[in-house]
Image (cartoon, rainbow, N blue to C red):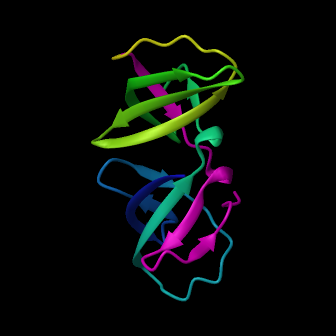
Amino acid sequence: MNIISGSYDTKQQKFISEEFELELKIKSNISTAGVMDAKIGIRPEKMTIVAFQTNHVITGEIIGVENLGAFTIIDVTSHSKIFKIRMRGQESFQLGQEIFLDIPPNQIHLFDADDLAIAHPITE
C-alpha cells in the first residue's frame, strides 16, 4: 500500500501533506475536531495514470517499469515520495516520463497517528 503522512482537517474535510492537499469527505465518528495527524493509504492497483491534472491528481516522474506479463508495476516519484502503481497488461512507459496519478477518494484508506483505520475506503 502507498502511504502518505500528513494531517486531516475535520472541518474542511481535507487531507494535507507536504506534497499536496486532497478533499476527502468521510463518514466517520472522529471525536477530534479541527486538525489531526493522519495518513492516507492507497493500493497500487487503485491508482491510475490519467491524461491531465484534476482535483485528485498528482504529478510524478517514472523511475521504474517492470513488465510482469499479466500486469505492469510502475514506480513513480512525486515530491520525494515513491509510489507503486499496478496496471493490467503490458504497458509501455519511458524512464523520466512525466505522468499524472489519479488518487480516487473512494479508494483511499484514512488512518490516525497510531495507524488505526478511521475510514476505509472513504465515501464521497
Image point 64% across, 69% down: which residue? 119
The C terminus, quarter of image = bottom right
Q: Residue furthest front?
A: 68
98 relative position to 10: left or right? left
Image point 52% across, 70% down: which residue? 111
Q: In this orientation, which residue lies closer to the viewer: 61 or 67?
A: 67
Residue 109 at x, y = what percent?
A: 60, 61
In the image, which residues are magenta? 97-124
Q: Is residue 4 above or below residue 64?
A: below
Residue 93 at x, y = what percent?
A: 49, 13
Q: In this orientation, which residue lies closer to the viewer: 54 or 117?
A: 117
Q: Is residue 27 magenta?
A: no
Image point 57% across, 83% down: which residue? 30
| Location of residue 26 (image quadrant) | bottom right
Image point 34% across, 37% down: which residue? 78
Q: Residue furthest bottom?
A: 31
Q: Is residue 42 above or below residue 71?
A: below
